[in-house]
Amino acid sequence: MSTRNTKQKEIIFTTLCELRTHPTILELYEAVHKKESSIGQATVYRNVSKLVEEGKILKVLTKDGVDHYDGDCTQHSHFMCKVCHRLIDLYDINTDSLVKQVRKDYSLDIFGVHVLFEGICKKCK
């Protein structure tokens, strides 16, 4: 099944990729609305869901109860500050040995890994 790439969907995707701040859906809507005021909240919500399903963006699940979104789908992990709730991209974190161990110990097929580290960032220390 092919998916349509509408102008609105492209604006939403481009805006998310430009932000690099892991916005919530509301923050993304506000940024999109500033660029193109004719794009409504329902359109942003619907297209973000489609972009996640298509694997073009990531939904970052956090313990703060709010989903965040990431336009960078390269393999990387995240760190979330427990004080300011800022998400930070972490690259070059080797999860291969952990995946191998889990596969071996539990006989599981693993298709993806999403690692979220929690702690206190430099600014909040």
Image (cartoon, grey):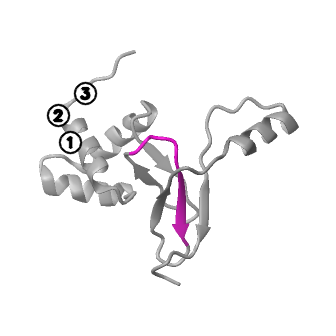
Determine which quarter of the picture holds residue 46. top left
Taking the spot 74% from the left edge, 45% from the top edge, the residue there is 98
Tell me whether the residue at label 2 lies in contact with that at label 1, contact meaning CB atoms closer than 8 angstroms.
Answer: yes
The local crowd at label 2, few if under 14, some if 14 to 19, many if 20 or more residues have their Cα within 10 Å, is few
Q: Secondary structure at mark 1?
A: helix
Image quarter hosting the N terminus: top left
Magenta range: 72-81
Where residue 73 sits in the image (x, y, percent)? 44, 41
Where residue 104 sits in the image (x, y, percent)? 84, 34
Taking the spot 27% from the left edge, 24% from the top edge, the residue there is 4
What amino acid is at disc 3? Asn
Q: Secondary structure at mark 3?
A: loop
Distance (Cα) linking label 3 and label 2: 7 Å
Tell me whether the residue at label 3 lies in contact with that at label 2, contact meaning CB atoms closer than 8 angstroms.
Answer: no
* Figure check: 35 above or below 105: below
Distance (Cα) linking label 3 and label 1: 10 Å
Q: Is residue 115 left or right of residue 86?
A: right
Where is mark 1, residue-wise?
11
- The dot on residue 94 is none
The local crowd at label 1, few if under 14, some if 14 to 19, many if 20 or more residues have their Cα within 10 Å, is some
Residue 38: in magenta span: no
